[in-house]
Amino acid sequence: MIGLVVVAAAALYRAFFGPSTIDRVLSINLVTSEVVALILIYTYLHQSPHYIDVALVLVLGSFIGTICVLKLLSEGKLL
């Protein structure tokens, strides 16, 4: 669990000081995945399935956001 926090801190550093926009997008995606992992670990440890929906919505939002940003960067337009 501490390893996830350390990797998230390194990814946040990369998100703020990354050399390119793609690096920043991917590091934010990594942080989101780690937050989802922490939510699922918390859900498992406390036997509380209520947070699984939150994790699924967060993953879906992260996926859609990543696709939109990468499409905007590659084509110059979103739609």
Image: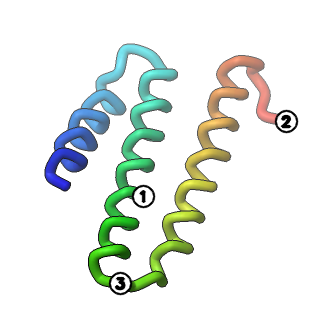
Q: Nearer the viewer, residue 13 or 38?
A: 38
* CB atoms of marks 1 and 3 within 8 Å: no
Query: What amino acid type is highlighted by mark number 1?
Result: Val
The disc label shown at residue 47, or none: 3
Is 3 positioned to the left or the right of 59 in the image? left
Q: Nearer the viewer, residue 14 or 33?
A: 33
| Residue linked to disc 1 | 36
Is 27 positioned to the left or the right of 6 in the image? right
Query: What amino acid type is highlighted by mark number 3?
Result: Gln
Q: Nearer the viewer, mark 1 or mark 3?
A: 3
Task: Specify how the rendered protein is coloured.
Answer: rainbow
* CB atoms of marks 2 and 3 within 8 Å: no
Q: Nearer the viewer, mark 1 or mark 2?
A: 1
Which numbered disc, 1 or 3, marks the residue that appears first in the sequence?
1
Which numbered disc, 1 or 2, marks the residue that appears first in the sequence?
1
The disc label shown at residue 79, or none: 2
Location of residue 12 by image quarter: top left
Q: Nearer the viewer, residue 64 or 72?
A: 64
In the rendered image of this protein, does residue 31 appear above or below residue 13? below
Question: In which quadrant will I find the C terminus?
Answer: top right
Location of residue 70 by image quarter: top right
- Mark 2: few/some/many CA within 10 Å (<14, 14-19, 20+): few
Residue 15 x %, y %: 35, 32
Question: Image point 63% across, 33% down: which residue?
Answer: 69
Q: Nearer the viewer, mark 2 or mark 3?
A: 3
* CB atoms of marks 1 and 2 within 8 Å: no
Q: Secondary structure at mark 3?
A: loop
CA gap, disc 2 to disc 3? 42 Å
Question: Image point 32% across, 61% down: which residue?
Answer: 38
Q: Nearer the viewer, residue 28 or 3?
A: 3
In the rendered image of this protein, does residue 27 appear above or below residue 55? above
Residue 26 x %, y %: 47, 30
